[in-house]
Image (tube, grey):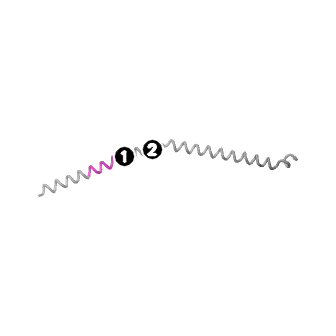
Amino acid sequence: MELITDYWQQLLFVLTVVVISVKLNASVAELKKDVDQILSRDTYIETTKLRAQVDMQEKQISALWEFTNNLRDRLTNQSK
């Protein structure tokens, strides 16, 4: 018991270091899992695919407007 009373500060320090080390290790492991999850999403590929789809739809909309304008022009030219 005398050993504990003589070295209680050192024992408290060692115990505190162990607890902090365990908490930090758990935090690092959790952060590694988060990073792996983020990297596995392939966000760049998904963004590229979505951009291609948007471009295709814009072209289709433009083609529809051109077709509509051509029809309107034909109808107005025939009525004259």
Quarter residue 22 falls in: top right
User: Which of pointers 2 and 1 indicates the residue nearer the eye?
Assistant: 2
* Residue 33 location (% of width, % of height): 57, 43
The amino acid beneath tag 2 is: Tyr
Quarter of the picture containing the C terminus is: bottom left
**Number of marks present in the image shown:** 2
Residue named by callout 1: 53
* Residue 34 location (% of width, % of height): 56, 45
Left or right, 42 with respect to 29, comes to left
Q: Which residues are magenta?
A: 54-64
At a point 28% along the width and 51% down the height, the residue shown is: 62
Main SS class of the magenta portion in the image: helix
Left or right, 27 with respect to 38, comes to right
- Crowding at label 1, few (<14), some or many (≥20) Cα neighbours within 10 Å? few
- Crowding at label 2, few (<14), some or many (≥20) Cα neighbours within 10 Å? few
At a point 24% along the width and 51% down the height, the residue shown is: 66
Residue named by callout 2: 44
Membership of 58 in magenta stretch: yes
At a point 79% along the width and 47% down the height, the residue shown is: 11
| Pointer 2 with pointer 1, Cβ within 8 A | no
Could you say whether the residue bearing mark 2 is in a helix, strand or loop?
helix
Dot 2 or dot 1, earlier in sequence: 2
At a point 86% along the width and 46% down the height, the residue shown is: 3
Q: CA distance from mark 2 to mark 1?
A: 14 Å
Could you say whether the residue bearing mark 1 is in a helix, strand or loop?
helix
